[in-house]
Amino acid sequence: MEYLPDKNSSYKDVAYWDERYRTEKHYDWLGSFSSFQHLLENVIKKDDSILILGCGNSSLSGDMYNAGYHAITNVDYSSVCISVMSAKYSSSPGMTWHQMDVRQLAFSDASFDVILEKATLDAIMVEEKSPWEVSPETSTFIHQALTEAGNSILNSTGVPLGCVLSLLMYYFYTSNYKATQL
């Protein structure tokens, strides 16, 4: 299979991902864990509960697990991916795998200390007309699963401004942030 789709909109199609994961063994979008591990170690504690959105067949989860992060929940749109990856890491207690659409997470609110994504937003936003005017489903799905003091780490080529603003507004709302004049 050729991994580049005929049209960009295929990145939103689960059939594209299922077919890709049937043949592709490994791919790390936007770099491997080692390329940004030094940054993550400053914001993620070893005992944090971590949600990886659009985990794919990346080595990110396994590399993080080997670095001492053992409460990792992986989510991907593709059932083929989840089947392959859960089998690959079956001997990693604390690491779980779930097939679901990241825009419709089936976790309780405030379930995770950290939400991490690498290029997942790029795939979700492939049909957005503008990064300045994103759909509500794209801009709101992340903050609901975060704990009050949680961190979202977005590693994307086009993080939508609406998503960033939504996360900031949610932070200020839940933290009772009070602006003061200097």
Image (cartoon, helix red, strand yellow):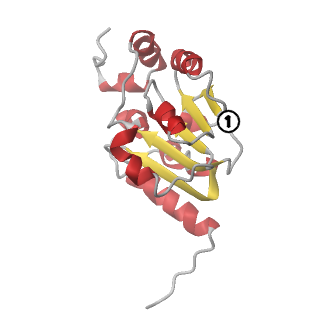
Front residue of 69/132: it is: 69
Residue 116 to residue 16: above or below: below
Front residue of 139/44: it is: 44
Q: Picture quarter containing residue 70?
A: top right
Residue at 38% across, 45% down: 155
Amino acid type at circle 1 is Ala
Q: In the rendered view of the protein, which quadrant contains the C terminus?
A: bottom left
Residue at 43% across, 47% down: 154
Residue at mark 1: 106
Residue 133 located left or right of residue 67: left
Residue at 31% across, 43% down: 157
Front residue of 116/104: it is: 116
Residue at disc 1, secondary structure: loop
Residue 38, position in %: x, y?
A: 39, 51
Residue 53 seen: no
Front residue of 43/2: it is: 43
Residue 45 to residue 76: above or below: below
Residue 159 located left or right of residue 54: left
Sort mark 1 into few (<14), some (14-19) or many (20+) by Cα contacts within 10 Å: few
Residue 109 located left or right of residue 33: right
Residue 49, position in %: x, y?
A: 63, 46
Residue at 56% across, 21% down: 82
Residue 76 seen: yes
Residue 62 located left or right of residue 130: right
Residue 38 to residue 182: above or below: above
Residue 1, position in %: x, y?
A: 32, 8
Residue 175, position in %: x, y?
A: 62, 69
